[in-house]
Image: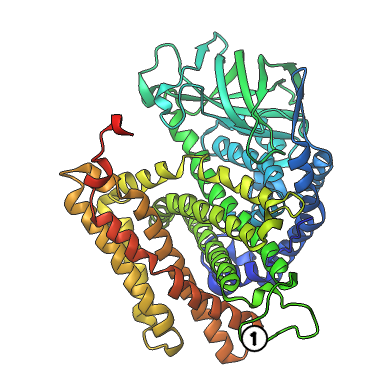
Amino acid sequence: MPIYTAPTHDLQFVLQDVLNISRSDTPGYDELDEDTTAAVLDEAGKLAVNVLAPLNGVGDEQGCTLENGVVRTPEGFKDAYDQMRAGGWMGLDADPEFGGQGMPYVMNCAVGEMFVSSNMAFNMYQGLTHGAYSAIHAHGSEAQKATYLPNMIDGIWSGTMNLTEPQCGTDLGLIRTKAEPQDDGSYRVSGTKIWISAGEHDLSENIIHLVLARTPDAPAGVKGISLFIVPKFLVNEDGSLGARNALSCGGLEKKMGIHGNATCVMNYDGATGYLVGELNKGMRAMFTMMNEARIGVGLQGYSQGVVAYQNAAAFAKDRLQGRDITGAQNPDGPADPIIVHPDVRRNLMDQKSFVEGARALTMWGATLIDKAHLAGDAEAQSMISLLTPVIKGFLTDKGFETTVLAQQTLGGSGFTRDWGLEQFVRDARITMIYEGTNGVQSLDLVGRKLPAEGGKPVMAFFDLIKTFIKENEGEDALKDDFLEPLKAASKDLQAAAMYFMQNGMKNPANALSGSYDFLHLFGHVSLGYMWARMAKVAAEQLEAGTGDTEFLQSKLTTGRYYMARQLPATALHRTRIESGGDTVMGLKAASF
């Protein structure tokens, strides 16, 4: 059975020491003192380790079942769900007006990492509900908020988002689901949606589906899409549940991973629905959910890497095989633990340096979301919009790669089900696909986010790094190992962006053929920036004699590894980008 240890120490280091959240002027952050965040992280960690992690393998083995229209979740899921409800975790950052605890979003992300690492499939039920809550909170009427949000925050009701149809995924302009207006102001929604996570289950009393559909006279394409609340059970005026709505689960997908989450085909047969926001403005409302979901999926990607790395490191310390090339390290035993071997150490350092850098990047992104939403900071909104495809795309690509590296550490044992690594690999794989494939993320980054606002957000990112380097160039502990590599990587990123500006307009293939490399180039620079920030704090605390010496020295050593062994990949990505699109597009379609 795989192990899981809640990384509360590292999360606290990132939140308090690196991001300085308790000293931030973002509204609500003044309440996030060290004792408060430590208490929240500790309790969430206990729940993750003691309740969720033991059910991860159970959910994978049993999966969900559909019988007579009823979906049953794996054994133990309902009890765990009720414990999550009782602890108030589902409303941690939700609006207090509707029963939430009102904590900033960054705390939801911090505890979310532990919940995902311990049981990704289970956490998706509340994750989808959070997204639906956010869309209704941002775009719903006051009556809709009062009707749905309190029970969704409590977890009595859950939520979903329904976008994809059999004939369309990314191109939502092709959706066919219809919404017929009724005399009472409601709509009759008819159509089929596929791949609906948590679409039907036995954990909550009601499921509030958010469904994209088009009215009969709607304009073609995405300009004619509206968003509708379509509850599983209709809600009476007094808030009690009424009749079952005309919707059903038509089947469960047979999937590579996340077996414990019900991925449903949803059929709407004239179901009663209620318009959210303005008619034909559904994409705006849905992207409130989508953008939040993309940050959450990036978190899923690296969080699977976290638990996989923990198990790989534990195995490497215990598994005896061969002798250290410099001399026996376990002379009384038949062999040395494999962690003494340089290639195993390289493998583990790749994993460790990624997950710790990814954690810092995601939490920084969460603070930008808080600054944008709580303080109305337009620059923070622009920056997180720029970083969202990077967080989603890069962290899930590398997160999946990390689970494979962890599996490789175990050798043959990693290929068997008993050790659990193969589940982490299978579960992590979906993160590269849903909420917009990573290819789509790269196109969004280069085609939309890079030129947004005349390029101001990306220039602000470059200035952020330039300023950090300039302010710390006198720090001997940082200069050679962190600042110089970051400067070189940033120059690669700027050169790649300039190449797109100079060559993308006359031949768009030059830009789009290099978009995936640009996503990874940007991701490496982002992690390099976070490692430089973490190194600065670690070096300062070591010099001052504060903090955990072993932890801080480990942080510096791991950071040096990333800067020396991973960050130079930016040069490779830049070279690929500058090779242009001719070699990518040169082969005729018929020749494939």
Q: How is the image coloured?
A: rainbow
Residue furthest top as drawn: 183
- In this view, the residue in front, 428 or 180, is 428
In the image, is residue 279 above or below residue 351? above
Residue furthest left as drawn: 506
Residue drawn at (45%, 68%), measured in percent from left and top?
566
The answer to whether any part of residue 547 appears in the image is: no
Q: Residue 208 sits in which quadrant?
A: top right
Q: Residue 224 sits in which quadrant?
A: top left
- In this view, the residue in front, 467 or 562, is 562
Q: Give amino acid for label 1.
A: Thr
Q: Quadrant of the C terminus?
A: top left
Residue at which label 1 appears: 549
Percent x, y of residue 44: 74, 58
Percent x, y of residue 265: 62, 23
Crowdedness near tag 1: few (<14), some (14–19) or many (≥20) residues, C-alpha within 10 Å: few
Residue drawn at (34%, 69%), measured in percent from left and top?
489
The answer to whether any part of residue 489 appears in the image is: yes
In the image, is residue 437 above or below residue 398? above
Q: Quadrant of the N terminus?
A: bottom right
Percent x, y of residue 445: 36, 48
In the image, is residue 64 above or below residue 568? above
Q: Secondary structure at mark 1?
A: helix
Q: Is residue 20 left or right of residue 313?
A: left
In the image, is residue 491 above or below residue 3? below
Residue drawn at (22%, 56%), measured in percent from left and top?
499
Q: Is residue 386 left or right of residue 45?
A: left
- In this view, the residue in front, 567 or 73, is 567
